[in-house]
Every structure is written in structure tokens, then in C-alpha cells.
Image (cartoon, rainbow, N blue to C red):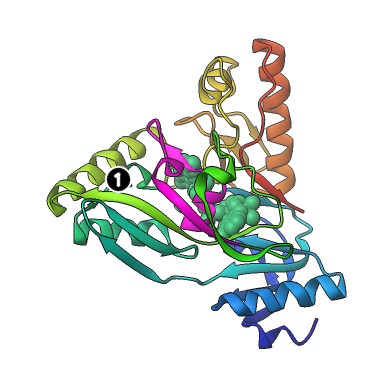
């Protein structure tokens, strides 16, 4: 375990709170930043041989890390290449490690349209595709044509996005699949109009979500009957606090880290919300955020 440096920049006993938007969680045995696909392949081969667990993290904006941390290696993909082919539509190839905010900046600069609804989502392209992130009735999956993946069983290859069998906030890619990059189909609009659309979506987001507190976005998936936020609000849980974690007053499906919360506070509050909503509304809410333990 002490020779991970040959695969990429490595930090040992690293505090994961610093790598998540919740700002919660203990240490990982190691965190490694991967710059090249071949290094990832070699790293996974090595970790599997020594039986060391690993977890791929994007920007950590949809996860909750336990207070005990993670007893293995956290992998961060620094794959940030961008290329494009232009004809009637725009086919954009993007590395998984690119931040959504960075890509939206390029969309404004070049007049690329189609992703404006992703504004304010603080993740990477890889993370967004892995969870099929979306907002305002749109999801990134609708813009993806193919993805480049790596898995220890099948190596590196491009597959059509339909093969991932994506749906609401999920794909059916196997647990051990890394998304290395993707091709997105976008179109063109005047840069000023792209910028205006982004501003419009951002204003709506800012008005309805507690963007200035540490959180991991919506905690629960929306059940088919009604939005999770509506059900939590109806159950009277806005402002409910356990330890340092609180159900946001602004958006009931956000739990915010208001007073230096522990992961245990968030877990307990999530359980309380699930039980109360089930009792009041007869619906068991399913977590949208992923747990790293
Ligand atoms: C203030 C705020 C607002 C938000 N608003 C929204 C919203 O409007 N809509 C929405 O959908 N989400 C929203 N989110 C949640 C989150 O930002 C998104 O789900 C985002 O797309 C997650 O990306 P990430 O890079 O942070 O992934 P992470 O949180 O790091 O990872 C999420 C999951 O994806 C996996 N993963 C990450 N990268 C890859 C990869 N390259 N290959 C395979 N698997 C990978 C991880 O292993 C993990 O299981 C919000 C979060 C916050 C904090």
C-alpha cells in the first residue's frame, strides 16, 4: 500500500470531509488522483491483487462518508480532455473528471446549448452520468450518446448510452464500472442566450434550494406519487434537527450540515424522516445519496 505513488499523486490517511460538499466524514487510508487511463487500469489490477477495497469519487456532491472514514483507497479521476465534432449538431467528447460548472463556462463561451439545466449542480461529468443527474424535468442522460467505460472484466471500451439502461437517478452499469468519458449531443445558440438560460435556471435554483449550506443535494429520490420534498414538508419535518444536521427550511429534501454535523447525525435524521413520512404518508423514501463506509 505504500507504493501507490507510481499510479498517481497519492495522499495517505486523508480527511474525506475535504473532498465532499457535505464536509463530513473520516479519513481514507489513501486518496489517489489518476491522470491517465492506463494508470487506472494498472491501479485496479494492483488493488485487486492485494485485496484492498477502493471507491471512485467525483466531486463528492452526492455522497455521505461515515465518521469512521473508508478503509481503502479513494480514486479521483483527473481525466479532463475535451474534443468536438461539428456538423448540424455538436458532438462533444468530455473527460469524466471535468466539473459541470467548467463545462457550462465553455458552453457560454462557444454557444453550446442543451446543458443549461445542469447549472448549480456541483459535480463532475462522470458523477452526473453515473447517477443520471438532472433538474427542472431534464436529465443529463438525454444528452449522452455514448460513454467510455473501464471495468476489470471488459477493459476499456465505448458503449452506447442505451446499453447503460439508465432511468431516474440511476444507470444499470455494474458497480465496478468506471465512466472515463462521454459523448454529448448538443446544439448551437448565441452565447448570450446560453448565458441567459443559465442565469434563469440558477436564479430558480437559488430561490428554492439552500445552496449556501454544506449538503449533498436531495437526500431522497422522488417517489412516483409526489416529490420527496413535498412529503417531508407535509409530515412537518422542515427544521427538524438531530445533532448538527437539519432538514432545510428552504427545501425539505435537503439535509444541511448546519452545526458541524457528524455522519451519524445525518444517518439518524434520514432514518427519522423515512419513518415519519412512512407513518404519515404511507411511502418509504429511498435514499438518493450514496454511502461511503
Ligand atoms: C447544492 C447541491 C445541489 C444539487 N443539485 C442537484 C440537482 O439539481 N440534480 C441532481 O441530479 N443532483 C444534484 N445534486 C447532487 C450532485 O451534485 C449530483 O448528483 C452530481 O451529479 C454528483 O456528481 P459528483 O461528481 O459529485 O459525484 P459523487 O458524489 O462523487 O459520486 C456519486 C456516485 O457516482 C459515482 N461516480 C462518480 N464518478 C464516477 C465515474 N466517473 N464513473 C462511475 N461512477 C462514478 C460514485 O462512485 C458515487 O457512487 C446537488 C448537490 C448539491 C450539493
Closer to the camera, 50 or 59? Answer: 50
Quadrant of residue 178 within the rendered picture: bottom right
Q: Residue at horizontal 72%, vertical 27%? A: 272
Circle 1 packing at 10 Å, graded few (<14), some (14-19), many (20+), is many
Q: Residue at horizontal 56%, vertical 24%? A: 228
| Quadrant into which the N terminus falls | bottom right
Q: Is residue 142 above or below residue 38?
A: above
The magenta segment is: 123-149
Closer to the camera, 59 or 159? Answer: 159
Closer to the camera, 119 or 134? Answer: 134
Query: Image check: 98 left or right of 285?
Result: left
Q: Secondary structure at mark 1?
A: loop
Q: Tell me if I can see residue 60 in this picture.
A: no
Count of numbered badges drawn on the protein: 1
In the picture of the structure, the residue carrying the numbered disc 1 is: 114
Closer to the camera, 70 or 166? Answer: 166
Tell me if residue 6 is in the magenta stretch. Answer: no
Could you say where residue 82 lies in the image, as x and y percent from the top left? 37, 68
Could you say where residue 66 lies in the image, as x and y percent from the top left? 74, 53
Q: Tell me if I can see residue 236 in this picture.
A: yes
Q: Is residue 52 above or below residue 121?
A: below
Tell me if residue 134 is in the magenta stretch. Answer: yes
Quadrant of residue 204 within the rendered picture: top left
Query: Image check: 26 left or right of 227?
Result: right
Q: Residue at horizontal 55%, vertical 26%? A: 222
Could you say where residue 191 lies in the image, as x and y percent from the top left? 15, 54
| Quadrant into which the C terminus falls | bottom right
Could you say where residue 143 lies in the image, as x and y percent from the top left? 39, 45
Q: Residue at horizontal 70%, vertical 17%? A: 278
Q: Is residue 121 above or below residue 14?
A: above
Amino acid at each position: 500500500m505504500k507504493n501507490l505513488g507510481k499510479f498517481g499523486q497519492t495522499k495517505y490517511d486523508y480527511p474525506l470531509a475535504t473532498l465532499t460538499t457535505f464536509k463530513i466524514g473520516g479519513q481514507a487510508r489513501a486518496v489517489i488522483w489518476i491522470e491517465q487511463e492506463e494508470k487506472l487500469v494498472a491501479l485496479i489490477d494492483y488493488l485487486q491483487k492485494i485485496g484492498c477495497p477502493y471507491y471512485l469519487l467525483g466531486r463528492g456532491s452526492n455522497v455521505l462518508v461515515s465518521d469512521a472514514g473508508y478503509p481503502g483507497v479513494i480514486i479521483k479521476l483527473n481525466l479532463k480532455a475535451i474534443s468536438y465534432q461539428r456538423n448540424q449538431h455538436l458532438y462533444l467528447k468530455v473527460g469524466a473528471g471535468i466539473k459541470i460548472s467548467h463545462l457550462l463556462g465553455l458552453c457560454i463561451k462557444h454557444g453550446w446549448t442543451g446543458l443549461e439545466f445542469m447549472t448549480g449542480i456541483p459535480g463532475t461529468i462522470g458523477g452526473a452520468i453515473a447517477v443520471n443527474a438532472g433538474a427542472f424535468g431534464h436529465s443529463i442522460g438525454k444528452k449522452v450518446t455514448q460513454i467510455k467505460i473501464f471495468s476489470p472484466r471488459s477493459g476499456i471500451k465505448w458503449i452506447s448510452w442505451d446499453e447503460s439502461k439508465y432511468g431516474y437517478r440511476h444507470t444499470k452499469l455494474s458497480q465496478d464500472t468506471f465512466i472515463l468519458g462521454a459523448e454529448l449531443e448538443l446544439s448551437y445558440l448565441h452565447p448570450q442566450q446560453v448565458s441567459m438560460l443559465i442565469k434563469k435556471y440558477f436564479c430558480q435554483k437559488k430561490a428554492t434550494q439552500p445552496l449556501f449550506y454544506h449538503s449533498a443535494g436531495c437526500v431522497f429520490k422522488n417517489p412516483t406519487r409526489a416529490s420527496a420534498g413535498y412529503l417531508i414538508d407535509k409530515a412537518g419535518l422542515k427544521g427538524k434537527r438531530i445533532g448538527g444536521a437539519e432538514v432545510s427550511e428552504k427545501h425539505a429534501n435537503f439535509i444541511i450540515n448546519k452545526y458541524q454535523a457528524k455522519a451519524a447525525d445525518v444517518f439518524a435524521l434520514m432514518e427519522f424522516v423515512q419513518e415519519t413520512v412512512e407513518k404519515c404518508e404511507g411511502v418509504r423514501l429511498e435514499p438518493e445519496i450514496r454511502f461511503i463506509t
